[in-house]
C-alpha cells in the first residue's frame, strides 16, 4: 500500500475522533439531530487544528446514504466519495488559489443544479479570507438567497479579513488551540499503532513545538520517525526542532529568579553554540513565567491538560523563590524583547541583556514590598525580615502631638502628608490634590512620555522605565527601579529635565519641578527614616540637618522627631535595611 503521511492517515473521520474541539462538534451533532441547520457555517481558528476535518465530517453527515446522521457510515458511496475528495455534491474550493471572481461566478452557476446523489450541494471554501472583494460580492449574492439544497462551509485563519456582511450570514464557530496534554495523548496513540517507541518528554516536546496544532504535531512526529527510526528520545526531538529541553528551560528560569547572572550568561552561551532557536526560547520562557504567575495566584494547581506533574512540582518550588510583582516585571521585559528580536542583529546579545535585566528585576525588592513589610510591622505583626526583632516586646512609642509622618506608609497618604508639610509655610499655594494628581499622571504616563519624547528623545525613552510615585504642590517625584538607575541620571541634564518639567507642569496646570529617585532609596526616603548605607554609622540625629520652621515650633518638632528616631519601630527598620538615619524631615 502506498505510504500515507501520518496527519492524513490519522485525519479524524467521525465527530468523536476530533481532538479538543468538543464545543464545536457537540453543537454540530445537536444541529444534525434536531435538523436545525444553517445555510452557511464559518470555522475560525489557527491552522492545523481541525477546521477542514470537521467540515468534511459535517458534509458526510449531511449526505450519508444511511440518512442524515451524527455518525456518518464511511461505507456508502457518498461517504467514500467525500473521503476520496471526488464527490460531485461536496465541492472543496481553496480560497487561496481560487481567489478570482470567475471561480465564484462558476460556483454561482452550479449552485442552481440539484445535487446528483446526496441531499445537499455543499461548498467547502478553505482560507475564505483570501477571496478578492469582487469574489466576495459575487458570493454574497448567493448567500443572500441560497437555494434550500445548498450549504456553505467556510474556514479561515483570519476572520477579520472577511466582509462583515458575509460573517453575519454564517453560523460562526471558533476552534481552539489544542492543549498539549491532548496532543500528547493523541501522539501516543499514533506512535503505538505505528510501533514507535517514544519517550513521554519527547512527545511533550513535539506538542510544545506544535503550539496547539495537531496536524503540525503529527507531521513533526512523521519527520522524526523518518529521521530517527522507531526509537525516539527527547534529545532527538529537541535537536531536530532547535528546541531547548524542559529541564534546561526550568534551570534558566531559576537562575533568573535567583539573580544568578553568571549562570544565565553561561546557559545562553551554551544554547547559542548548540544552535538553539533563541527567539523560540524567549517564547518558551514567557510561557514558563506565565505558568509561574498562575501558580503564584491559584491556590491549588491541579494537573491540568497543559501541565505535567513534573512541571507543576518545579513551578511550585520556584514560586517560593519569588512573588507576583517580580514575575510580572520579568514577563514584561521578555515580551518587549520578543518584539525587538525580529529586527535584532545579534539575538544572543539582545537575549543576554534582557535576561540580565530580568535577573536583576527578579531580585530587587519593590517599593510595594518594602511598604507592605513596614505596614505589617506597624500593625504589630512579624514583618518578614523583621522576625528577629519582633520577638522582643514592643515598647510604647513616646507620645507625639501629631500623626507620625514617618509611619504613614500608605503610598497615597504619604504623598498627601508630604504635600501638607511642604505646603505649610506657603498657605497661598493653590489647593492641590496630590492623590488625584498622582493617579492622573500614572494613567497618562505613556502620553506624557510621548510628549517629552517630542522635545527630548533621550528623556522620553528613559521615562519608559520610570513611574511617578508622589506629587507635591510644587514637585513631582519620579521613581526608577534600581536596575534603571542609570536612566535616572539622564534627568541631571538640564535639557532633559526641563522637557519633563515643562510637560508635567502643563499636565498639572501649575509649575512643578521633578525629583528623580531610584526606587530602593525612594522607599526609605518615603518612610522618612533610613537610607541604606554601606558604613554602619550610629543612628544619631544630632548632626543631621533637620528642616523645620524657625522658632519654638521648630524646636518642639525637632524634639518629637528625635524621640521618633529612638522608637523600636525605627530600630527594626534600621535593622531590616542595614541602614542608618541620615535625615529627619518633618
Ligand atoms: Zn455514509
Image (cartoon, rainbow, N blue to C red):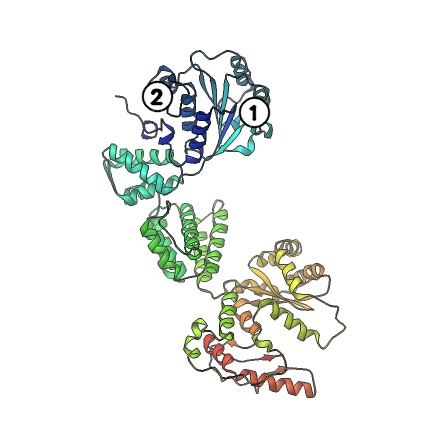
* C-alpha separation, residue under disc 1 versus residue under disc 2: 37 Å
Crowding near the residue tagged with mark 2, few <14, some 14–19, many ≥20 C-alpha atoms within 10 Å: some
Q: 402 or 443, which lies in front?
A: 402
| x and y, in percent, of residue 241 in the image | 34, 41
Q: Residue at x 52, y 62 (%)?
A: 484
Vertical placement of 414 versus 335: above or below?
below
- Could you tell whether 234 is left or right of 113 in the image? left
Q: Earlier in the sequence, mark 1 or mark 2?
A: 2
Q: Which label was assigned to residue 73?
A: 2
Side (left or right) of 450 relative to 267: right
* Secondary element at image label 2: loop
Q: Quadrant of residue 327?
A: bottom left
Residue 535 visible to an observer of this rendering: yes
Residue labelled with disc 1 = 132
Image position of 167 with respect to 433: above or below: above
**Quadrant housing the N terminus:** top left
Ligand 1 within 8 Å of disc 2? The answer is yes
Amino acid at each position: 500500500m502506498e505510504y500515507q503521511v501520518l496527519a492524513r492517515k490519522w485525519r479524524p473521520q467521525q465527530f468523536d475522533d476530533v481532538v479538543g474541539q468538543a464545543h464545536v462538534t457537540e453543537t454540530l451533532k445537536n444541529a444534525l439531530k434536531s435538523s436545525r441547520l444553517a445555510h452557511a457555517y464559518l470555522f475560525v481558528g489557527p491552522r492545523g487544528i481541525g477546521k477542514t476535518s470537521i467540515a468534511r465530517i459535517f458534509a458526510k453527515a449531511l449526505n450519508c446514504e444511511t440518512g442524515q446522521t451524527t455518525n456518518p457510515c464511511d461505507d456508502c458511496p457518498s461517504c467514500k466519495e467525500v473521503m476520496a475528495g471526488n464527490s460531485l455534491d461536496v465541492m472543496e474550493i481553496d480560497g487561496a488559489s481560487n481567489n478570482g471572481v470567475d471561480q465564484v461566478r462558476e460556483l454561482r452557476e452550479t449552485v442552481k443544479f440539484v445535487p446528483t446523489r446526496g441531499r445537499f450541494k455543499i461548498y467547502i471554501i478553505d482560507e475564505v479570507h483570501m477571496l478578492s472583494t469582487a469574489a466576495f460580492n459575487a458570493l454574497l449574492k448567493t448567500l443572500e438567497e441560497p437555494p434550500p439544497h445548498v450549504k456553505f462551509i467556510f474556514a479561515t485563519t483570519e476572520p477579520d479579513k472577511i466582509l462583515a456582511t458575509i460573517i453575519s450570514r454564517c453560523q460562526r464557530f471558533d476552534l481552539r488551540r489544542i492543549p498539549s496534554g491532548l496532543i500528547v495523548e493523541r501522539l501516543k496513540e499514533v506512535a503505538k499503532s505505528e510501533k514507535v517507541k517514544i519517550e513521554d518528554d519527547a512527545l511533550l516536546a513535539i506538542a510544545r513545538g506544535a503550539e496547539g496544532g495537531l496536524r503540525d504535531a503529527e507531521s513533526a512526529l512523521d519527520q522524526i520517525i523518518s529521521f530517527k527510526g522507531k526509537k525516539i528520545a527527547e534529545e532527538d526531538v529537541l535537536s531536530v526542532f532547535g528546541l531547548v529541553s524542559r529541564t534546561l528551560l526550568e534551570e534558566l528560569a531559576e537562575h533568573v529568579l535567583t539573580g544568578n547572572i553568571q549562570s544565565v550568561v553561561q546557559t545562553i552561551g551554551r544554547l547559542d553554540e548548540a544552535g538553539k532557536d533563541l527567539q523560540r526560547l524567549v517564547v518558551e520562557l514567557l510561557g514558563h513565567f506565565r505558568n509561574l504567575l498562575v501558580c503564584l495566584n491559584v491556590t491549588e494547581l491541579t494537573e491540568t491538560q497543559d501541565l505535567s506533574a513534573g512541571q507543576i512540582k518545579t513551578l511550585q518550588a520556584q514560586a517560593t523563590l519569588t512573588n507576583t510583582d517580580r514575575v510580572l516585571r520579568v514577563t514584561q521585559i521578555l515580551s518587549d524583547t520578543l518584539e525587538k528580536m525580529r529586527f535584532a542583529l545579534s539575538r544572543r546579545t539582545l537575549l543576554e541583556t534582557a535576561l540580565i535585566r530580568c535577573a536583576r528585576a527578579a531580585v530587587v525588592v519593590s517599593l510595594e514590598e518594602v511598604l507592605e513589610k513596614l505596614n505589617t510591622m506597624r500593625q504589630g505583626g512579624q514583618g518578614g525580615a523583621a522576625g528577629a526583632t519582633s520577638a522582643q516586646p514592643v515598647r510604647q512609642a513616646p507620645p507625639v502631638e501629631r500623626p507620625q509622618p514617618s509611619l504613614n506608609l500608605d503610598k497615597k497618604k504619604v504623598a498627601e502628608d508630604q504635600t501638607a508639610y511642604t505646603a505649610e509655610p506657603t498657605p497661598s499655594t493653590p489647593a492641590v490634590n496630590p492623590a488625584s494628581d498622582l493617579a492622573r499622571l500614572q494613567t497618562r504616563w505613556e502620553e506624557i512620555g510621548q510628549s517629552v519624547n517630542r522635545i527630548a528623545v533621550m528623556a522620553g525613552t528613559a521615562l519608559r522605565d520610570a513611574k511617578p510615585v508622589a506629587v507635591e504642590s510644587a514637585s513631582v517625584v519620579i521613581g526608577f527601579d534600581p536596575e534603571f538607575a542609570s536612566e535616572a541620571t539622564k534627568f541631571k541634564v538640564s535639557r532633559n529635565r526641563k522637557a519633563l518639567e515643562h510637560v508635567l507642569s502643563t499636565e498639572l496646570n501649575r509649575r512643578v519641578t521633578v525629583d528623580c529617585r531610584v526606587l530602593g532609596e525612594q522607599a526609605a526616603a518615603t518612610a522618612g527614616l533610613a537610607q541604606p548605607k554601606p558604613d554602619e554609622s550610629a543612628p544619631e540625629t544630632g548632626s543631621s540637618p533637620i528642616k523645620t520652621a524657625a522658632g519654638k515650633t521648630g524646636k518642639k518638632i525637632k524634639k518629637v522627631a528625635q524621640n521618633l528616631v529612638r522608637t523600636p519601630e525605627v530600630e527594626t527598620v534600621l535593622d531590616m535595611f542595614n541602614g542608618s538615619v541620615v535625615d529627619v524631615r518633618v
